[in-house]
């Protein structure tokens, strides 16, 4: 009787979905050939049925028609359809528990309430991070984000005062999109960014941060520095943010009432729309405390991407791990390292050494990118950024990202084009 070994992947965003493509393209057939008496099966678990191109969120939260929604949200089942049906299974559920000794993961379906325990031979933790609002990141199924965006579109059209908390790319890009859409067309609304830092876009050099602020100013955006939002609550109900719908205004479904924003200097501000963009939290509540660091991120071997404390053949990929500062580029760079090291751990030989590192058991070492690399559009025709420490001109920002938030590049993830070749 054939033994079944589950390769369980928790999460189907950049890290999880990219690894699923890599595995199904380059590893699964090797496993079948090397161990014909064993059935390997990829089990991909995610609370959403669709992959979300969150790069484009700053534009679609202003206007859902600005980018094609069938491209912003891609069915995960469609992404994996080209592969043999018996090679994988997709489970729409959320990871709620992990037992490293029993080597099982518990998942729960929010829709039906069912709980399932899945044994794993190998486990990839790719659960990512949670945004403070579903406007900029998935929280459960993709429909929550889509509905939040549609609601926000309606609210922005009537707003006169908008507050955005945070000073990173999401905050800056969102403010730029709102300012360009409304203030540049003649409507005058007050847009304020509140950041606890002494500059926006802290990854970039001060001169680029200053340039970004000047571009924002042209769209009617004001930046309030060294100030932190401590609480935000709806004037109509007194409930704290974030609200159930996550759109940053009033109770769920409400289209009236302003939001009072409390600051750490004791002052308050009010706005028709409040958008939290203050960072993210790792999705690790299901993990034992021994597997996470003091900030809640997965304790990952920074060289091999193994989760050493979780036992053999357990790995971490994407923003949920503490092995890098995160981001799409580091995730892309990490996928081949994880895949090759896992393949070595599975004791599989490579079918074609010229396409891989060779049949040895030597680990492939991951090296994080610590260079000044960030591309931030401010509206469609301008922005600031750098790549590998080189400053990028505004027109390059516009062409690379500002024009359509790189929507065509979603295929790198959804169709696995980034890893068409095993080297990545």
Image (spheres, rainbow, N blue to C red):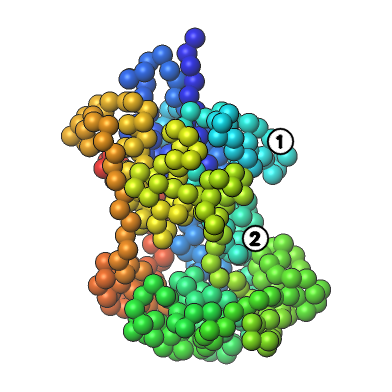
**Which residue appears at 30% of the width and 53% of the height?**
367
Q: Is residue 298 above or below residue 7?
A: below
Precedes in sequence: disc 1 or disc 2:
1
Nearer the observer: mark 1 or 2; the answer is: 1
- One can see residue 168 in this view: yes
Answer with left or right where residue 61 lies relative to residue 263.
left
Residue at 27% x, 32% y is 361
**Labelled disc at residue 102:** none
The residue positioned 49% from the left and 46% from the top of the image is 126
Asked whether residue 416 is in view, the answer is: no
User: Could you give the CA–CA distance between mark 1 and mark 2, rounded to whole angstroms?
Assistant: 25 Å
Query: Of residues 148 and 345, which is closer to you in this image?
Result: 345
Observer-nearest of 77 and 45: 45
Q: Are marks 1 and 2 in contact (CB under 8 Å)?
A: no
Q: In the image, is residue 17 above or below residue 185?
A: above
Q: Secondary structure at mark 2?
A: helix
x, y percent for residue 107? 63, 38
Residue 169, given in percent of the width and then of the height, sits at 45, 71
Task: Give the left or right position of residue 144, taking residue 336 as reference.
Answer: right
Q: Is residue 286 left or right of residue 27?
A: right
Categorize mark 1 by other alpha carbons within 10 Å: few (<14), some (14-19), many (20+): few
Please tell me how crowded label 2 is: few (under 14), some (14-19), or many (20+) other residues with Cα within 10 Å: some
The residue singled out by tag 2 in the image is 147
Quarter containing the C terminus: top left
Label 1: which residue? 114
The residue positioned farthest toward the left in the image shown: 354
Q: Secondary structure at mark 1?
A: loop
């Amino acid at each position: 009787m054939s033994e079944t070994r589950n390769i369980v992947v928790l999460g189907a965003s950049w890290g999880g979905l990219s690894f699923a493509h890599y595995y199904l393209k380059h590893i699964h057939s090797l496993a079948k050939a090397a161990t014909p008496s064993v059935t390997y099966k990829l089990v991909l678990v995610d609370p959403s049925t669709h992959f979300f191109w969150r790069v484009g969120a700053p534009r679609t939260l202003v206007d859902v028609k600005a980018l094609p929604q069938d491209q912003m949200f891609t069915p995960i089942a469609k992404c994996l359809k080209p592969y043999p049906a018996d090679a994988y299974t997709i489970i729409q559920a959320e990871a709620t528990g992990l037992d490293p000794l029993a080597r099982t993961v518990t998942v729960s379906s929010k829709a039906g309430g069912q709980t399932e325990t899945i044994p794993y031979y190998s486990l990839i933790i790719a659960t990512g991070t949670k945004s403070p609002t579903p406007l900029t990141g998935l929280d459960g199924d993709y429909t929550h984000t889509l509905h939040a965006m549609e609601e926000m579109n309606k609210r922005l059209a009537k707003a006169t005062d908008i507050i955005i908390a945070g000073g990173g790319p999401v905050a800056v890009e969102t403010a730029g999109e709102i300012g360009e859409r409304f203030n540049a067309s003649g409507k005058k609304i007050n847009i304020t960014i509140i950041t606890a830092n002494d500059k926006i876009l802290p990854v970039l050099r001060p001169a680029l941060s200053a340039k970004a602020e000047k571009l924002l100013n042209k769209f009617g955006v004001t930046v309030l520095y060294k100030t932190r939002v401590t609480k935000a609550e709806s004037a109509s109900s007194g409930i704290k943010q974030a609200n159930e719908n996550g759109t940053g205004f009033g109770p769920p479904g409400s289209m009236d009432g302003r939001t009072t924003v409390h600051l750490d200097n004791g002052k308050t501000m009010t706005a028709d729309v409040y958008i939290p963009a203050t960072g993210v939290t790792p999705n690790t509540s299901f993990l034992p405390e021994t597997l996470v660091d003091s900030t809640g991120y997965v304790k990952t071997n920074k060289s091999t991407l193994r989760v050493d404390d979780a036992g053999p053949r357990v790995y971490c990929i994407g923003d949920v791990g503490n092995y890098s500062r995160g981001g799409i580029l580091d995730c892309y760079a990490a996928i081949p390292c994880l895949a090759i090291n896992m393949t070595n751990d599975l004791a599989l030989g490579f079918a074609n050494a010229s396409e891989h590192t060779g049949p040895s058991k030597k680990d492939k070492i991951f090296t994080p990118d610590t260079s000044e690399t960030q591309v931030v559009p401010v509206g469609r025709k301008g922005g600031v950024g750098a790549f590998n420490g080189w400053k990028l001109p505004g027109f390059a920002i516009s062409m690379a990202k500002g024009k359509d938030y790189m929507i065509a590049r979603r295929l790198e993830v959804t169709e696995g084009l980034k890893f068409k070749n095993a080297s990545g």
